[in-house]
Image (cartoon, rainbow, N blue to C red):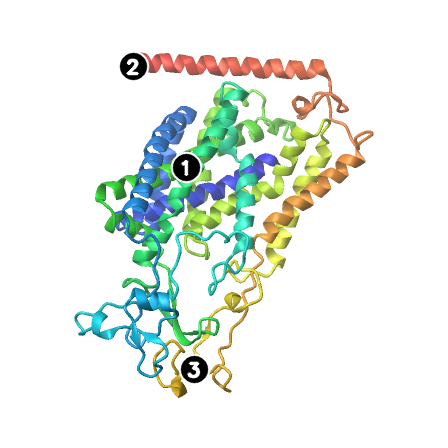
Amino acid sequence: MVSCCTITSFLCLLAGNLVGTGAVLAYLLTITPTGAIWMSAVLVFAYTVAGGLYSVAYTDVLQAAVGWLGCMTLAFYSIKNEKITAPPPSIGFPSYKYPDDTTCEMYDGVPCENDVTACCYNTDKWCPSDNKCFYDNGAYPFGDQSHFTDQMTNAYSLTPFPNAVVFNWANIFVLAFGNLAALDFQARCMASKTAKIATIGCAIAGCLTFIVGIPFAYLGSITRVYYGPDSARASFETDSCHIGLGLPTCAMWLPDQDGFLKYLTNEVPSFLGTWCLIGIVASSMSTCDGAILAMGTVFSHNILRNAGYFFPYISQDFIEEENLITVARIISVPFTIASAVIATLYRSSHSLGATGYLLIVAFDIVLASVVVPLFGCFYTKKPSSLAAFCSIVTGILARVILEFTLPKDGYLLMPFDGHEFLDYGAAASTAFPTFFDVPTERHWDPSVEGEQCEQSRYNDWTGIDSLAAPIVALIVFVFVQWLERDKPFFTFAKDGIMVGYLKEGQVGYDPEVRNSARSESNAQEKEDHARVDEVDNVMDDVR
């Protein structure tokens, strides 16, 4: 059951990374996103299946070194050299009123014609003629920021715009704890020579995540300078209104999905932009190869190897190491195809974008199902197998039920009070917003009958389901564990599938049988290492 959950999770993880890689290739090669996704799938599948864990390890080292360095170099270059790292207050347009004296002084504003107490756009300075006019869309009256210090604690930190604070916290929780059960993470830890090396590797990787990720995140605000709502390249959806923004009729900004790629290819030195793009693709490819390898290995070694206990007609002679390796390679084909199909279908069907959505779904699956039993195994002296089983089933059921019962409108915003959490409505009036310098009677009055802006409140509880499912699973695990505090409801056969997983103190535990199972496992491991060494020697001779 755990294997099925983790494989399902990694189908989504692989699909999300194929979408990301495909987006870059589609933009650079001017091909369709679908073609780019399948091209990415074929390339990563080829070298993963050909080399196995060794190819993944060697290519990941190279990809990480090149990718991290490229992304960091571009991030620090942009932060240091960009004169504007976030959209400044809007300069406006003819007849535009500035919201405060600071913005007025910044752009040498002049007294307004109709409201002499207000400060307006300086037409003589900024727009002396039609062919020499400097203006924007007035999208940032007070400017934007590269980061907001209270964005994770205050739902209104982005006023007048909404802040998805609940969804952001849910994402952090899902990615942080769900990733503990990720197959590639587990594989890399288990492949370490010692537990200490695995611990040190995890600590170093965590630090590198902050070192690379935080500076790179600043590029989002820099991209908005060039491709945001106040840029000359912005596109909008017309005939909408918003009372919180004081707009009786306006155009809702449509973010450019290729904005960041355009920034890398048009606004920074070509060498740095190319280096960063290589780093992005390398990062996605390194995750893809690990996902393909992990799914094939788990299917062959965890599912097929134990299939004989449930399906007696499967010969034990068939379940040998060489056959399992072959099966792992063969089964990787349908797994890769399935992920590519998912990537193709979901690449643009979610407001998060398919890459972000699928990555969150991947870790959401394992968080709801197997993370609680994983903690229970390590932090419970005598973990109950029945508690683990019930926890997995309950977590899955809770997650599926909440997915289809909680309100979700696709905007990922909880229904908080305030104008910030109202969706755009249809155009309400032809009158002017109050920040236009026109006679008062021509300004929009939303209290007038027939001039109201009809808006609905955002109502999306996405994230609550992700947090609730593991909590329900934890409650069930603790309850069943307590019920079995004296003795289990059932015991496992001494020659059954669970013999190697029982701990001392559990009913059915037999140290001789367990040691025998361990000896067989160690013997098989030594044989595998001997086979790998033999292959390495042959390759050395060939070279």
Mark 2: which amino acid? Val
Dot 1 falls on a residue whose secondary structure is: helix
Residue designated by label 3: 444
Q: Nearer the viewer, residue 177 or 397?
A: 177
| Image x and y of residue 378, in percent | 65, 29
Q: In this figure, what is the number of numbered marks?
A: 3
The disc label shown at residue 542, or none:
2
User: Residue at 30% across / 62% down in the picture?
Assistant: 231
| Image x and y of residue 471, in percent | 66, 45
Task: Describe residue 37's horizontal placement relative to residue 401 as left or right.
Answer: left
* 499 relative to 368, above or below: above
The quadrant of the rendering that contains the C terminus is top left
User: Alpha-carbon distance for marks 3 and 2?
Assistant: 81 Å
Other-residue count near label 2 (Cα within 10 Å), few / some / many at <14 / 14–19 / ≥20: few
Res 394 seen here:
no
Res 228 seen here:
yes
* 504 relative to 48, above or below: above
